[in-house]
Image: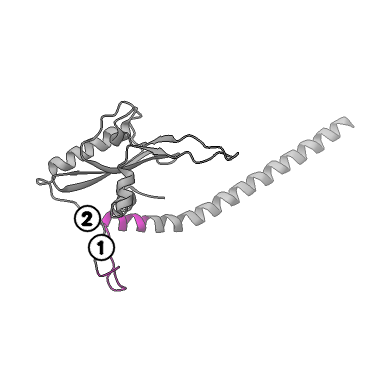
Amino acid sequence: MSSAYDLTLILRSALANPDFARYSATKVAQFPGGRDAKGAPAPSFQIQNGNRLLAGTDGVTRYPGLVAGKSGYTAQAGNTLVTAAARDGHTLVATVLNPQSGKSNAVYNETRQLLDWGFAARARTAPVGSLVHTPTAGGPAGPGQRPTEHPALAGARLTARWGALLALPLAGLVVLTLRQWRRQQARRRRRARVAAFLQRD
């Protein structure tokens, strides 16, 4: 599983790679065709960036200052979008998972609202926490230099551990109950067959 916190860390780290930043900010690219299975020249083709806030497509207005982003979808997370935008030398990353409105382009509209709020509130709002610190120029943190963890993430880890411990006996109870129910069903079927056989005689 991943959280909005995880995806924000991933995008922040990825943006440190100039190639990723350049590719992610590309709206349209023309791919060379190469050759087909028979060796004949194949025509080039165009690919488009699926981030509608970057491309300004499908009823979504392009977001000014957008640096990079990645949209996605899974059955459990629903529509997802992690996006970075820059303004006045300041970069914000917004992550939206599974908007509940059910409206078309909701993930893009909610991201736009988050970025607008973040830029407007930058000088007026105190942060509630921070992302884990990035490694220094001297290299990754040593054994005694663990990165600071956001309190919400620490709480989520504790909840996950307790959830796993409680899930084991619960799963065992479910298995035992299911086995008992199957045995009862098998006994009922045997009795029904015996009763049907005796009635024929």
SS at mark 2 in the image: loop
In this picture, residue 126 sits left or right of residue 166: left
- Residue linked to disc 2: 130
Q: Could you tell me which residue is drawn at 63 percent across and 44 percent down?
A: 181
Q: Position of residue 101 (x, y in %)?
A: 32, 30
C-alpha distance separating marks 1 and 2: 9 Å
Q: Position of residue 48 (x, y in %)?
A: 38, 35
Say which amino acid is labelled 1. Thr
The reply to whether residue 13 is in sight is yes
The extreme front residue here reads 40
Decide which of tag 1 and tag 2 comes sooner along the chain: 2
CB-based contact (under 8 Å), mark 1 and mark 2: yes
Badge number at residue 31: none
In this picture, residue 160 sits left or right of residue 130: right
Q: Neighbour class for label 1 at 10 Å: few (<14), some, many (≥20)?
A: few
Give the magenta part as a residue range: 138-159
Badge number at residue 148: 1
Residue 143 located within the stretch drawn in magenta: yes
Q: Could you tell me which residue is drawn at 68 percent across and 46 percent down?
A: 183
The reply to whether residue 83 is in sight is no
